[in-house]
């Protein structure tokens, strides 16, 4: 996955704005960065291994007065991170430059063919073939037609922005990788994601698969891959610039952790009818009484949300629910029926595995619902219906507010389905929703009271090589998610496990060098969790506990305690994950890691 941006503007001087846009896209990849700017007689290209800030430094003294330019920040797939493999890529003449996000699957054949026709390649990437293909076609056609003919030869996925040395215009094309156009005054933008150009416009057009276009100072023309003109209406996006900036926090992750109370309110508020305290769900692909079972498909953190969702759907709505890793589901021969509600959960809406799994489920005739944060993303367009989380832009690679808004929405949906299917009555519904509505203020209270304590625990944990996260029942998925957070940003090996399973193997690992984080908040299995703690303590293991209410015997067993407010049992997962996010954050920050852009990762994984 990579981030791409293009700007065409009658105001000129685009270098700084392209760099600024790239910084906002860096969450999509940060192996290398580059820009191409059209100058008086040619195209200026500068690209470099490393982060956008390194490229910025290199460009500090460079003056190019350009009215059209493109930029790229890379997450390497084909070809190691290096200067030559960085984008933009150019044709043989240097009169065409492009940036690409995606994978060209038939690039070996195309490269061979182009080589035979005399083209010289300078990189190991799949993307460079596109520049040479356009060069071939441009020798016999006008530029838009050349781009159209070239993209028709590509197999795989692509979001493309292409410039040539003769005109102030951007040429764009999309198949299975995101691309959004922004419309300003005397200027037009295109990028992988809206925050890249949010400082300059919030009027956007989402490009669909199979669309190609030309952007100029005055706007955009869009065609399909056969060359037929398409009319598309711009939408105004409600995201504010402040949401896409750090707002005084050291890192996006810390800001996003602190935004969770508001993000949950924004997600549930419009869906609860206040007079009656009842759930309003705007769009489902199947009437609740016709749903026989549920299948949740997702990856990573969103998969963990799905595991909690299974409890909600089964216990509140009486619906048998399976949860599958999207990457596994794709290659199985699953059993689905037209009355299986398939729920694809994704923050970005661009995760390749989740898109692939959703397509497979649709081919099998199942109705589908997307739970997604990014408006207009691929998953939202492919699913039959969409419920948006309103978390706002999540920039940090480690997902935080997306997760808690997904959980809140799953809970609300389960309450709605439970009511519509006659599993819970109006009074129970009202009680469950009152609990949900009280969650944001409890989260704020916990952050005020406990953050310093959590910071100390995180710093302490940073001195270990491994950690174990244990929870039972609804908190088992939270143990998985807590461990994932620690791994991905602090690089400390961590494992999430069902507390009751520990005695079947992992207990052999316990000694004074392996700390265990126990999720031990109020639940019907708390006594059993306490017994699991005793088993650890008697083997000299160090224990950190997440506790609610008064449990002196658990405090006695613990080396560190974090107090979580009392909430309904079903809502503990939503509040319990927050201290675990903070533990990971403070451990990683103490170790000096790049919290928002951890090594080897990218925000949305658009490759298989
Ligand atoms: O955008 P998605 O929710 O589909 O992304 C799925 C995973 O790639 C994502 O949750 C990943 O695990 C995060 N880095 C976890 O913090």
Image (cartoon, rainbow, N blue to C red):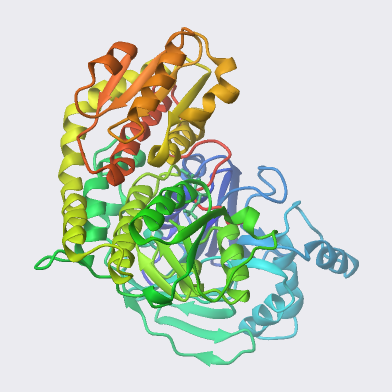
- Asked if residue 363 lies left or right of residue 587, the reply is right
Q: How many marks?
A: 0
**Can the viewer see residue 22?**
yes
Q: Is residue 73 above or below residue 477?
A: below
Residue 350 image offset from top left, x and y in percent: 52, 61
Which residue sits at x=52%, y=56%?
322
- Asked if residue 492 lies left or right of residue 126, the reply is left
Residue 96 image offset from top left, x and y in percent: 65, 68
Which residue sits at x=64%, y=53%?
328
Closer-to-camera residue (540/231): 540
**Can the viewer see residue 393?**
no
Instruction: Give the quadrant of the N terminus.
Output: bottom right
Closer-to-camera residue (506/524): 524
Closer-to-camera residue (466/13): 466
Which residue sits at x=62%, y=74%?
364
Q: Residue furthest left?
A: 275
């Amino acid at each position: 996955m990579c981030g791409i941006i293009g700007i065409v503007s009658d105001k000129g001087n685009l270098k700084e704005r392209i760099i600024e846009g790239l910084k906002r896209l860096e969450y999509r990849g940060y192996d290398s960065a580059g820009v191409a700017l059209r100058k008086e007689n040619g195209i200026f290209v500068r690209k470099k291994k490393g982060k956008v800030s390194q490229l910025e430094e290199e460009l500090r003294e460079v003056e190019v007065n350009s009215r059209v330019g493109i930029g790229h920040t890379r997450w390497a797939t084909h070809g190691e991170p290096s200067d030559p493999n960085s984008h933009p890529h150019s044709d043989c003449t240097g009169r065409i430059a492009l940036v690409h996000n995606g994978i060209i699957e038939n690039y070996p054949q195309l490269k061979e063919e182009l080589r035979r026709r005399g083209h010289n390649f300078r990189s190991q990437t799949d993307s460079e073939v596109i520049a040479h293909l356009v060069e071939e076609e441009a020798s016999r056609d006008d530029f838009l037609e050349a781009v159209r003919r070239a993209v028709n030869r590509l197999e795989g996925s692509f979001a493309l922005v292409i410039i040539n040395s003769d005109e102030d215009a951007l040429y764009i094309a999309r198949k299975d990788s995101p691309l959004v156009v922004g419309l300003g005054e005397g200027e037009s933008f295109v990028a992988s994601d809206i925050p890249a150009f949010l400082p300059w416009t919030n009027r956007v057009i989402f490009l669909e698969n199979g669309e190609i276009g030309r952007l100029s100072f005055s706007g955009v023309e869009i065609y399909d891959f056969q060359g037929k003109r398409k009319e598309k209406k711009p939408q105004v996006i409600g995201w504010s610039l402040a949401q896409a900036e750090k707002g005084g926090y050291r890192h996006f992750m810390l800001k996003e952790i602190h935004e969770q109370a508001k993000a949950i309110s924004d997600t549930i508020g419009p869906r609860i009818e206040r007079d009656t305290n009842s759930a309003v769900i705007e769009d489902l692909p199947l009437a609740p009484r016709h749903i026989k079972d549920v299948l949740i498909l997702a990856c990573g953190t969103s998969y963990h949300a799905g595991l909690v969702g299974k409890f909600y759907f089964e216990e509140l709505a009486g619906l048998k629910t399976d949860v599958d890793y999207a990457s596994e589901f794709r290659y199985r021969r699953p059993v689905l029926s037209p009355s299986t509600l398939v729920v694809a959960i994704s923050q970005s809406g661009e995760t390749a595995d989740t898109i692939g799994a959703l397509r497979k489920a649709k081919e099998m005739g199942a109705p589908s619902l997307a739970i997604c944060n990014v408006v207009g993303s691929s998953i939202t367009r492919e699913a039959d219906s969409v419920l948006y989380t309103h978390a706002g832009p999540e920039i940090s690679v480690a997902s935080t507010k997306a997760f808690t808004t997904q959980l809140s929405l799953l809970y609300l949906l389960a309450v709605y389905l439970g009511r519509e299917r006659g599993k819970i009555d109006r009074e129970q519904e009202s009680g469950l929703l009152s609990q949900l509505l009280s969650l944001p203020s409890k989260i704020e209270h916990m952050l005020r009271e406990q953050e310093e304590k959590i910071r100390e625990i995180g710093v302490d944990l940073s001195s270990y090589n491994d950690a174990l996260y244990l929870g039972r029942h609804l908190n088992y998925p939270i143990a998985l998610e807590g461990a994932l957070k620690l791994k991905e940003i602090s690089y400390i090996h961590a494992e999430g496990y069902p507390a009751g399973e520990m005695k079947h193997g992992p207990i052999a690992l316990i000694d004074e060098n392996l700390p265990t984080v126990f999720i031990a908040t109020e639940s019907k299995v708390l006594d059993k969790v306490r017994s699991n703690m005793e088993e650890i303590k008697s083997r000299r293991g160090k224990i950190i506990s997440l506790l609610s209410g008064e449990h002196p015997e658990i405090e006695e067993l613990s080396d560190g305690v974090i107090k979580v407010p009392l909430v309904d049992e079903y809502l503990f997962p939503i509040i319990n994950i927050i201290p675990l996010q903070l533990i990971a954050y403070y451990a990683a920050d103490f170790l000096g890691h790049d919290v928002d852009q951890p090594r080897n990762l990218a925000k949305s994984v658009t490759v298989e």
